[in-house]
Structure formats: structure tokens, C-alpha cells
Amino acid sequence: MGLKPTRFFCHPSSEKQEFKSKYELGKTLGSGSYGQIVEATQTSTFRTVAVKYIKRKNVESMLKIQKQNVPAEAVYLNSLDHRNIISLIDMYEFKNKFALVMERPLASLDLHDFISKYGPQNDAVASFIEQQLLSVCLYLDNNLIFHRDIKSENVLVNCYNYNIKLIDFGSATYANQETYYGNFGTPAFSPPEWISESGYRPEPTTIWSCGVVLFELLTASLPFYDEDHVMRATLFFPDLVSHSARDLIRKMLKRDEHERICFEEALQHPFITVTGECGENERVLDDSIYSRCSAYTIYENQNCDSELPLSLI
């Protein structure tokens, strides 16, 4: 799976009226230093979407496309073609901000909230989610895009079938150099070489972040809570973590980046290939459960279902 053909679009400020006619805005779903995310309905299809408003002054990186300076995040999303990456539908430029119109998966939570609500996951669920995350990160690496902020909050998981979507490419960059500097990303999910500011490389950094996500999936906690713990990279596992999972996590969280497992090796590890052997139908929750949680949306603070079973059935 490669990149999409170039077809970049960014509607200029003069088309603000068109934006208003195409999208009916609803409530604010979330906000941060970047701007805010607003619920919207596509008037022609009645499709529910999410509009991410990014203040121009807060854009991390801009790229010049067809004589327009636009957020690099939009350029990356527009070129990527992978089922586990959130889709960019439309984009508008306003006076002081950009509006990115994106798909809005239903019945989904960000992985951090998913774990907070439902606790540690069993090996089958964890391996299935981790396999998707490793696969999409390998896809990005093959297409020379470095996300730089892989963490549980940037992974959406569908409560119905455990399929994931990777989001928030605001810190991403082209992986066109061997070593990177600068504190992009999140300390709790970043490797020792990032903490020490000695320079970090795309694949070893991303493998480390994926290892932290896997640890969190299995234990509902983080392996390291401050920079000193990250630098020591000493792991302590609760009894509930299987030997196979421990082996993979240890290989992903090696302190020396040159000793860390690579994407292909991680995807061939027994924890991924053996634990995740059950078929797709075995991963899907009962339809009656899905019908009760299908109205759930990724930004609202409400439960999919108070009795939602998260083991494979």
C-alpha cells in the first residue's frame, strides 16, 4: 500500500460561504493549544464529520503546495492511503486558521480512555491492536513519514471490532534524514535518546513508543513515569503479563536504540503471530452490544456500554 496520487485541495478564504453551506456545525468536541474540534454534518450526505480548527500561529510546520502555505499535517493525511489512518475529507483556509474536515469514527474511544474505562486487556485483544499499530507505523516508515507522537491518546479503537485509526499528524515530518533533534512528541512515550537530546531516529523511536502502548494495553499503566525511569529503562511486569508479551516488550524497550527490534521482526514475534491467530469473526462483539454503543462518538465523555465485554468472544 503506497501513497495516493497528488490531489491536494485547500479552499481559500473566499469560499467561506461554501464551507457554511456544505457543513452544518454542531457542538465543540474538544480543544487545546492547537485550536478546537467541532462536530459537523455534511449537508449533502448527512454524514457526521469532525472539523479540526488549527490556529495559523500554532501550526507546527507549513508546506507550500500549489502556491499555498498549508499545514504539513494536511499534506501528509491527504497523501496517505491506509485503513488504519484517519481520513482527510476536505480543507479550508480562513483568515487566522485552517479547517480540516476529517472522518469521525463512531463507536470509538481513544485508546487511553478505552484502557482507563475497561482496564488491562487480554493477550488476544492487545496483540490484535498492537499488530495494527505496528503495521500502520511500518507503512509510514516505508513512505518516509515520521509521526513523532505515537501514544495511546493518538490511537482510536472501535469498541465493536477493535480496529484502530491513527490520528494527529501535527508533529509529523518527512523521514528524509537519519537523525532528528527537538522535543516533538510526548515524554512518557519517548525513548532515552529523545530525553537526552542526543538525537533520535524514526524507526527505533517509533518502536519504543509502540512498546509503551503495548505495556499500557496489558497493564493499564505506563512502564516509566518520569525521565529518570526512561533513562534507566528498567522494566517491572505485573504477574498478569504473559511471558510472550514480556519478551516482545523487552525487545521493543531496549535502552540502546541499536539493539531494539525492528518493525518486521516485531510483526513476526509469536505474541503477534500466534496470539492473534483467531479469525475476524471471533473479534466482533455481539450485535446487540454494538447497537447500544453505535451512537457513541470519539470525543464525548460517555460509556459505550456499561457491560461491554472486552475479551474476544
Image: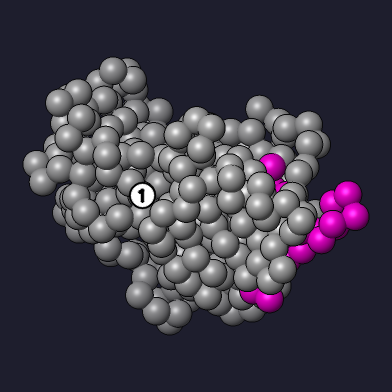
Q: Nearer the viewer, residue 282 or 65?
A: 65
Residue 23 belongs to magenta span: no
Vertical comparison of 288 with 39: above or below: above
The residue indicated by pointer 1 is 298
Q: Is residue 176 above or below residue 62?
A: above
Specify the quadrant of the image occupied by residue 185.
Answer: bottom right
Amino acid under disc 1: Ile
Quarter of the image with the C terminus in it: top left
Direction right: furthest residue: 67
Q: Residue at x 85, y 51 (%)?
A: 65
* Magenta stretch in the rendered image: 57-78
Whether residue 245 appears in this view of the structure is: no
Seen in the image, is 206 located left or right of residue 242? right
Q: In the rendered image, which quarter is residue 215 located in? A: bottom left
Give the residue at x 90% y 55%: 67
**How many numbered discs?**
1
Residue 162 is left or right of residue 21, and the answer is left
- Taking the magenta stretch, the answer to whether it contains residue 67 is yes
Question: 28 or 158: nearer the eye?
Answer: 28
Please state the horizontal and vertical placement of residue 13, each as a whole percent of the image.
74, 59
| Image coordinates for residue 212, horizontal then vertical, percent | 41, 58
Percent across and percent down for residue 131 are: 44, 36
